[in-house]
Image (cartoon, rainbow, N blue to C red):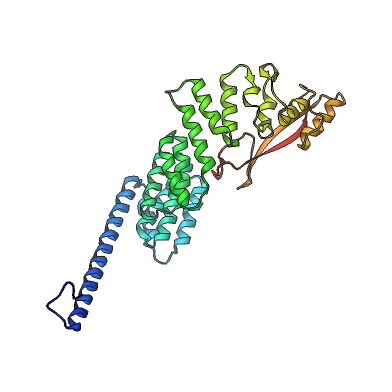
């Protein structure tokens, strides 16, 4: 302290100055906290006012303001309305709850549930606004960040996704595959590049990413009459068996392809090649054996199960339609009688 107060050598004076500084800092921090709290309240009021329906709102105000009802009980009422398909009533309850709750974790919970409900109801822009508002209070809300990626993917706003993925990466979420997948979608949707340029860029991404390999293979099958497997002979076709299986044989050009065991196992199971005598995939192995016995009435059917939520779907998905987990599809092969 002597550096600043060279004329004063009394230790008591230094202590007083120190306490004065601490008091001023505490006072400023206190008033700043009050200011931020008021600002957040006003922001939430504006948010609620923006989306509230006013219809039957008084009934919900009475329920939500009732201090005898716990937060869990009110959320349960909202969930019951949601389950019945009455989304607007559930939304109104969540909006009113936002003005009641004070705890940061509770606000994050309500914002997340409201954002997911808007998403479920198909209001993507409202869902986006809700999750962005949630992140102002809780920047580490993984659920909000995850849904924002899905929303921007559905809206094809791919340019906004890298920033969200960066935030998830900061929270120790592995986003490498997802980042390359989004980049692949962005390449395909670009109006500035022609087909060959897009295909070249996708090949670079597909070298070490099996998800992008599927994106590229689907892209090729949509745009080329003849599929030249030589161009993608390094792919693991066991992960693409459903596409190859359903591809008309007149569209496939396999000449010049080096020994790709997975591809020729599928073709042999279809009866289009004799390159493979067996397969590590049980269903393909059975079909190969049946073909060798001249039995041609067996076929394959495909289903896809989400490794996260265990829901089963008839069509392939990159992102689960139920829980929106990325790269969670597991292909199920089933031998059936050809119809």
Q: Is residue 116 visible from the viewing direction of this image? A: no
Give the number of marks. Answer: 0
Q: Quadrant location of the C terminus? A: top right
* Residue at the image position 66 percent from the left and 17 percent from the top: 251
Q: Position of residue 248 (x, y in %)?
A: 68, 20
Of residues 54 and 264, the one drawn nearer to the viewer in this rendering: 264
Residue found 23% across the figure and 73% down from its top: 23
275 and 40: which is toward the camera: 275
Query: How far across and down, in percent of the image, does residue 285 sit?
Result: 80, 33
Furthest-right residue in this view: 293
Position of residue 160 measured from the top left corner of the image (x, y, whole percent): 40, 39
Left or right position of 38 against 204? left
Location of the N terminus by quadrant is bottom left
What residue is rendered at 25% in x and 62% in y?
A: 32
Q: Can residue 3 be seen?
A: yes
Q: Is residue 92 above or below residue 244?
A: below
Residue drawn at x 51%, y 20% is 196
Q: Nearer the viewer, residue 253 or 339?
A: 253
Q: Is residue 77 above or below residue 4?
A: above
Give the x, y percent position of residue 123: 42, 40
Name the side, left or right, on which 304 lies relative to 293: left
Position of 16 with respect to 246 (left or right) is: left
Task: Decide: is 316 above or below 137.
Answer: above
């Amino acid at each position: 302290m002597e550096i600043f107060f060279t004329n004063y050598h009394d230790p008591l004076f230094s202590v007083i100055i120190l306490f004065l500084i601490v008091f001023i800092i505490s006072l400023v921090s206190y008033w700043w906290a009050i200011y931020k709290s008021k600002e957040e309240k006003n922001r939430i009021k504006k948010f609620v006012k923006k989306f509230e329906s006013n219809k039957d709102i008084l009934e919900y105000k009475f329920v939500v303001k009732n201090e005898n009802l716990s937060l869990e009980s009110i959320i349960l009422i909202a969930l019951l309305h949601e389950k019945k398909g009455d989304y607007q009533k559930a939304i109104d309850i969540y909006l009113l709850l936002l003005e009641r709750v004070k705890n940061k974790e509770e606000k994050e919970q309500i914002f997340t549930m409201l954002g997911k409900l808007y998403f479920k109801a198909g209001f993507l822009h409202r869902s986006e606004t809700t999750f962005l508002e949630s992140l102002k209070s809780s920047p580490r809300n993984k659920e909000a960040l995850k849904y924002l990626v899905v929303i921007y993917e559905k809206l094809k706003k791919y340019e906004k996704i890298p920033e969200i993925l960066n935030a998830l990466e900061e929270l120790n979420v592995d986003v490498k595959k997802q980042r390359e997948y989004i980049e692949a979608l962005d390449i395909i949707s670009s109006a500035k590049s022609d087909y060959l340029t897009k295909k070249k860029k996708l090949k670079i991404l597909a070298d070490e990413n099996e998800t992008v390999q599927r994106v590229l293979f689907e892209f090729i099958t949509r745009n080329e009459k003849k599929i030249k497997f030589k161009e993608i002979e390094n792919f693991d076709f066991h992960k693409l068996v459903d596409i190859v299986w359903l591809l008309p044989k007149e569209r496939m050009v396999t000449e010049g392809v080096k020994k790709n065991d997975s591809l020729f196992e599928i073709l042999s199971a279809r009866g289009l090649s004799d390159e493979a005598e067996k397969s590590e995939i049980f269903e393909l192995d059975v079909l190969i054996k049946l073909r060798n016995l001249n039995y041609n009435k067996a076929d394959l059917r495909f289903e896809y199960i989400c490794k996260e939520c265990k829901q089963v779907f008839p069509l392939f998905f990159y992102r689960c339609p139920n829980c929106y987990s990325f790269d969670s599809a597991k292909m199920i092969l089933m031998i059936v009688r050809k119809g």
